[in-house]
Image (tube, rainbow, N blue to C red):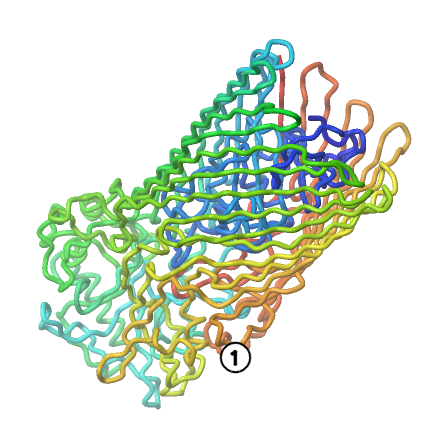
Amino acid sequence: MKLHKLALYLTAASLAVPVAAQDATTLADNEDEAIIVTGSSIKRKPQESAVPLQVYTSQDIEREGISNPEQFISLLNSNGNGADNLASNSDITSGAQRGTNGVSSANLRNQGSGGTLILLNGRRVASHGLGGGAVDVNQIPFAAVERVEVLKDGASAIYGTDAIGGVINFILKKDYEGMGVSSFIDKTQHGGGDIYKGSITFGIGNLDRDGFNIMAAGSYSENKILRGLQRDFVTTNLPSFGLSADTRGTPFATIIPTGTTTLNPINTLITAGNAPFVPGSTTVRGSGGINILNIPGGAGCSSVPGMFDYDEVLWGAADRAYACAYETGKPAVLTQPLQTISFITRAVARISDHELSLEYMRSDADATKSFSENQYSNNTTSLQLRYPRNTLTAATYDGIVASLRAAFPGIVLNAGNPIAYRWRCIECGPRTINTSTQADRLSFGAEGPLFAGWEYRAGASIASSQSKSRLGNGYHYRGTLANGAPDPTAPTAPGATAPGIVGVLNSGLINPFLPAGQTQTAAGLAALQAVSAEGVVLYGGKYKVTQLDASVTGSLFELPGGTAKAAFGVDYRKEEYRFNGDERAAATRPVIFNAPFDDAFALTPRERTVKAAYAELLLPAFDGFELNAAIRADDYTGFGSTVNPKFSFRYAPISEIALRGSYSTGFRVPSFNQIFNGTLESPLPGADLADPRDCPGGRPIVGNPLCVAINPNVLSGGNLNVGPEEAKQWGLGVVLQPSSDFSATIDWWKINRSGAITTLSVRELADNYSIFEDRFIRNAAGVLTQIDQRVINAGKAFTQGIDISFRGSGELGNGRIGLTLDGTYLLKKKSQLVPSAPISASEVGKFTFSGDLGLKWKHQLVTTYDIGDFGFSLSQIFRLGYKNNRIGQIGAGTLTRPDQVNRTDDYVIFNASVMYEGIKNMRVTAGVKNILDSDPPFAITYDTDTGAGSSWEPRVADPRGRAFTLLMEYKF
């Protein structure tokens, strides 16, 4: 199929530049081939679509130098700003983001990754094997893509579940002849985050001439790691801006005053009652931690790389005034390293007028998350860390005692007794989790004529995605049971007196009070290695989809505006999913400290079937006016049946103007995990929650005894009673095309969801305590001990916006100049937690930790110029700023800082490229991304509950900085 001859190509080889899409409604009039387009089962001209449909050809994509589907999707203005890419889920995650290791997903119309349907040649692919709730788009064999169709409208009436925000359909090549090779490099100026890709495509046979075509394509791509320490804008230590890390786990350990325990009946060096006071007052300053670098006469926290003063005012914790904090942003990964090998082969045969196809796809991907080093914190049960005084430790121990006595004359010390502490194990290295995913898909299709203008289309496919995550560096066997007793199944390091890393630390083999410039002993490093858990399988899962479908379409009768057409179809689908939390035998399963095992979420194989029938009717009622109606009935195992209609119209009173509109309902069923996961209980970290029963809002306030920070346990997991969420969608637009050189579209859209499947954050629960009081679980004494954060069908979500598109071109000298603008204006984003709750204030332009960040406006503006064998382009990427996050006492509204940033700056970058086609069969494209080398705007993304995030927003900005690209293609 030929696409719009005037489609403007945009900046080539650019990660952050819009692809040269053409709204299908404005394709040239001479494009008269009727095809099946996404969102309909009736063949039609793409330019006659009654809903917003954009078509991106392989040439458009190649001209951009886009190397994978994640990059493609990130450039769509219709795609929201969720934690859906490899940068936004590369740190420590919780809640709905658990199980997203190595996953990149789509998020059309701000509806979340579960609300966008991904298709390959019009049929479903399997959801990612870990989470089972969204498709990993990077498993699509991008080298073999002929075009991508993006439907920005609900389509449950045709496709069933998930198509709430829209549909992205990747269409593969089916008539490729010859052999083509390409190589691509995207190299950053400041190092880190480089991208390399190579591909080869081979095809023989011509459908029209030979009656067959066999095509095969393979590609290899590699995204290099980019760490926070490689970019200056990454930090969690900007206290004057209102950002500082809430952690006392530091490379030079913090002493934690502690009393006796069952297993340790001897008091530690400092007990809580003997911690130092503020001079001249009764305010305890040391009970929350004492770092001898930060006491009078100390060397200062910053004397050790990565450390700084703990901001006890920001976090409302006066008892931590003598503690230090640690820079958690620098060790984190900004972009995950990703290696992908994909292969696709497709055979198409034409017998008489019937076309048969058989294809097989395989994709292998390896991604690695990496984040801050583990911190080991003394507690009274499972982790009773005690730095002893023995022949290995005497010098360090005595120096600590001398420093404390010099700084606090009269302090009561239990000299000779062990020291309880909290420590960041730099020597252990950053924590890493490697995830490997294998995606397979085998499909068969047949289509052709039946009788008297009717055609059939049928197919079968089996798709699966199997993933496994393994622990890498930075994880060690704990060596203790839940009650603190030695774990007999854990390894014991040479020289240690007890198993695991607790045995190593409590033997004094490692010095947690090591000054800057000194290194651990060889014996200590060997002991850490001896108790390493590297290579242990963390968890794994497999998702499988088997699908059978058939449809018929043809003409019915004549109407004043043309021939009425109809389509009828049936669809059968079987979905299967399994997940294991820990592959090791239970009897020999030593605890690995801080490893995010999901034993409670393990699922034995689960399955469900979907049976559906649908019908579609196209009625050209009169000249220029076309009405389309569709309806689909689905029957789901465990959920019963649901019926969803869709109505749309297109009215073109004259060729230069067209009006279009639609109304539909949609639905999304919960994932297997959201239903069947067990309950995981874990402590709430951080210091940003007070009991909302006694302290309205649940935010700690210094000096208020009712608003003291607490750390109850949090219950997370599935819910057997969770049901499907439902949606209603509206759209209305106008298309202007006064000439072949100019087109403009404006589309208003609205989506209302009810019964939204979600996991509410602890903050959302606390802010609405009167509604969710039953989720705050107390003991007999009324003390808050647990918070129930399991999946629920929440109230409603309301979203609406306007899409604007402009394209113009004309002659300039001996060449042709073009201008393209694509923008999205978010009018409304609100939510209602439960039907009885009030509707929230506007969420447009406001920071949120989880879900979609609703940017009010974003656009791409591109100017191109073609002359001879050359093509030039300059583009601007714009993302409007938003209300910044506020943490600690700033978040509680009781504190301001001199340089406090209440609103982020706009994110604006420029890109340029040049393309040359003067060599036969070769195309060369060179580009510069982020010409001005602009850093991401300062944004507070630090989350005290997980320790993740820092000073920039991965849902909005690209951290790579200026980069240079080169794409070379040759066809034999």
Q: Secondary structure at mark 1?
A: loop
Residue 563 placement (x, y as % from top left): 74, 36
Residue 642 placement (x, y as % from top left): 48, 53
Q: Nearer the viewer, residue 871 or 130?
A: 130
Residue 472 visible from this viewpoint: no
Which residue is found at the position 61% from the left and 51% from the top? 646
Left or right: residue 843 compared with residue 320 = right
Which residue is found at the position 46% from the left and 62% from the top? 942
Left or right: residue 872 compared with residue 68 = right
Residue 654 placement (x, y as % from top left): 87, 44
Left or right: residue 77 compared with residue 572 = right
Residue 904 placement (x, y as % from top left): 61, 63
Left or right: residue 510 compared with residue 610 = left
**Residue holding disc 1:** 893
Q: Quadrant of the N terminus?
A: top right
Which residue is found at the position 26% from the left and 74% from the top? 404
- Residue farthest top in this picture: 210
Q: In the rendered view, would you say 346 is above or below 286?
A: above
Q: Identify the amino acid type marked 1.
A: Gly
Which residue is found at the position 39% from the left and 35% from the top? 464
